[in-house]
Image (cartoon, rainbow, N blue to C red):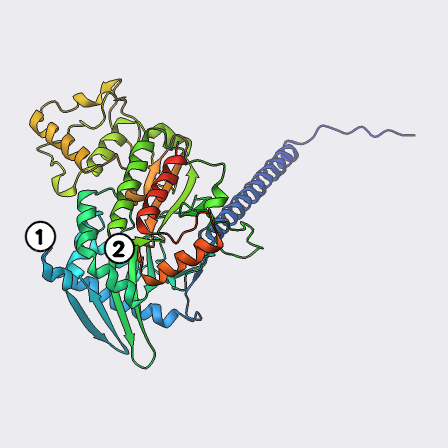
């Protein structure tokens, strides 16, 4: 058998071989990169869809095919004109009786929109640092409204702005007249206790569509904003009869709001904030007792704090911003008169990036500079002691707290491990003769048990006691 010996490989053949190998490797790398890129894009789309599904949990977009689309479109048009009028009117820092009685009706094609006490609610929005531009963009130009779907027994219609920042709720004429007749007392209470947990009403309106419908509705700040990370919600009245909800949704796209009996064995873990929280609930309940109302609820939700939020809670930058936010906006210091921090007694802090947020997980702007162990009460020693003392006295007299640095600060309280969203809602039920008869009937059918329909004094005391007993 003859063997054929191969001669030396020509240089050109070597170069061709190397060129082919190099090209093959390049093609393989490009293919892998393309596959990786496709995989990453697929993952991004997947997470985007999951976030959208979570964002839309319990709500349905009121699009052109929805039964309420035309109604909400008219509401948005009417609200736009109403807010624009407020923007064109000078701010009213001092409210008069005429401002509380103010009514304005604007005619539009196919409907009329009536606005009540506009100067009063405009001032309230300013106190919450909500600009009229923000308010208009959210209510009038920020996409379709959402219809809120839950296990609530209320017959009212609930609409949510597309960014979920504001609620619109239809109300009966009696409820609206009750609110307007007690609006002065409501504003006085919020002035005395600026960090009250009672829900903030931001507008009262009436829409009239000839030969079709007449609806009163109110605009409220959403207690659960932002809600992307909220994992459980409760409606607490402080009683037991009828206060349990089956948490199973049966696969339906609704949000189950749980009740008192679902909360058994759990606590609101606030640590140092417990005393403030329990006391503020007590004062809010006492105010509602003066209005002769009952059957109000504490809306409660929570979400775990991220590590960056835990780390940033005690940063110097965060504490300075929170302290400034916690004072009246009108009294907030200017650049020529920087703030002292008399409110953080005995605390020390370091300048760290402020990554706290109210739920979105997006970091706030980082603080510049660095420092170690700076006693907070010594910051800006240039300020006069008289200013510091008056601020501290005013802070305690109005029962303020250090608000978190976020849009919905009034309704947010941070515990050691969880962020809580809290607010007192449904304050329109008056203890009249119907409720007195209901109280008598329930007393006979549920002897010795705690039910919701009791006189306002008993309801107020029991409500505050429940909060005291379930907060740590």
Residue 353 is situated, as x and y percent measured from the top left of the image, at 31, 29
Residue, x 62% and y 34% (percent of image)? 18
Tally of marks = 2
Quadrant of image for the N terminus: top right
Q: Nearer the viewer, residue 80 or 254?
A: 254
Q: Nearer the viewer, residue 463 or 153?
A: 463
- Label 1: state its secondary structure: loop
Q: Are marks 2 and 1 in contact (CB under 8 Å)?
A: no
In the rendered image, the residue lying farthest to the bottom is 211
Residue 406 is situated, as x and y percent measured from the top left of the image, at 29, 41
**Residue 402 lies in what quarter of the image?**
top left
Q: Which residue is mark 1?
A: 94
Q: Nearer the viewer, residue 22 or 108?
A: 108
Q: Which residue is mark 2?
A: 201
Residue, x 9% and y 32% (percent of image)? 337
**Residue 103 lies in what quarter of the image?**
bottom left
């Amino acid at each position: 058998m003859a063997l054929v010996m191969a001669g030396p490989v020509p240089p050109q053949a070597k170069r061709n071989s190397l060129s082919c190998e190099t090209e093959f490797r390049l093609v393989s790398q490009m293919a892998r990169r393309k596959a990786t890129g496709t995989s990453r894009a697929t993952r991004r789309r997947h997470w985007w869809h999951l976030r959208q599904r979570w964002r839309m949990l319990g709500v349905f977009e009121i699009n052109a095919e929805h039964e309420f689309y035309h109604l909400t479109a008219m509401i948005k048009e009417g609200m736009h004109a109403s807010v624009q009028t407020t923007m064109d009117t000078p701010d009213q820092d001092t409210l008069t009786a005429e401002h509380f009685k103010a009514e304005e009706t604007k005619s539009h094609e196919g409907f009329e929109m009536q606005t009540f006490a506009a100067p009063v609610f405009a001032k309230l929005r300013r106190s919450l640092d909500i600009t009229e531009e923000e308010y208009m963009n959210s209510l009038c130009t920020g996409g379709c409204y959402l219809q809120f779907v839950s296990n609530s027994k209320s017959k009212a219609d609930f609409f949510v702005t597309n960014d979920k920042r504001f609620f619109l709720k239809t109300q009966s004429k009696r409820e609206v007249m009750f609110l307007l007749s007690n609006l002065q007392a409501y504003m006085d209470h919020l002035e005395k206790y600026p960090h009250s947990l009672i829900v903030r009403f931001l507008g009262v309106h009436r829409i009239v569509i000839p030969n079709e419908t007449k609806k009163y509705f109110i605009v409220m700040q959403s207690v659960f904003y932002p809600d992307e990370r909220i994992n459980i919600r409760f409606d607490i009245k402080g009683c037991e009869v009828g206060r349990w909800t089956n948490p199973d949704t049966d696969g339906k796209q609704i949000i189950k709001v749980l009740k008192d009996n679902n909360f058994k064995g759990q606590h609101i873990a606030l640590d140092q904030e417990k005393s403030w929280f329990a006391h503020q609930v007590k004062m809010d309940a006492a105010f509602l007792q003066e209005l002769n109302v009952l059957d109000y609820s504490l809306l409660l939700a929570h979400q775990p704090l991220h590590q960056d939020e835990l780390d940033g809670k005690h940063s110097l930058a965060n504490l300075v911003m929170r302290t400034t936010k916690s004072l009246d906006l009108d009294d907030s210091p200017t650049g020529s008169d920087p703030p002292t921090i008399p409110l953080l007694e005995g605390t020390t802090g370091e300048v760290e990036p402020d990554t706290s947020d109210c739920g979105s997980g997006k970091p706030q702007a980082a603080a510049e500079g660095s420092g170690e162990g700076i006693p907070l009460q010594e910051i800006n020693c240039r300020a006069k002691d008289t200013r510091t003392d008056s601020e501290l006295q005013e802070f305690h007299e109005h029962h303020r707290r250090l608000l978190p640095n976020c849009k919905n600060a009034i309704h947010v309280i941070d515990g050691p491990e969880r962020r809580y969203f809290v607010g007192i809602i449904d304050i329109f039920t008056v203890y009249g003769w119907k409720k007195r008869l209901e109280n008598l009937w329930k007393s006979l059918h549920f002897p010795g048990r705690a039910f919701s329909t009791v006189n306002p004094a008993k309801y107020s005391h029991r409500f505050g006691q429940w909060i005291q007993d379930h907060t740590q």
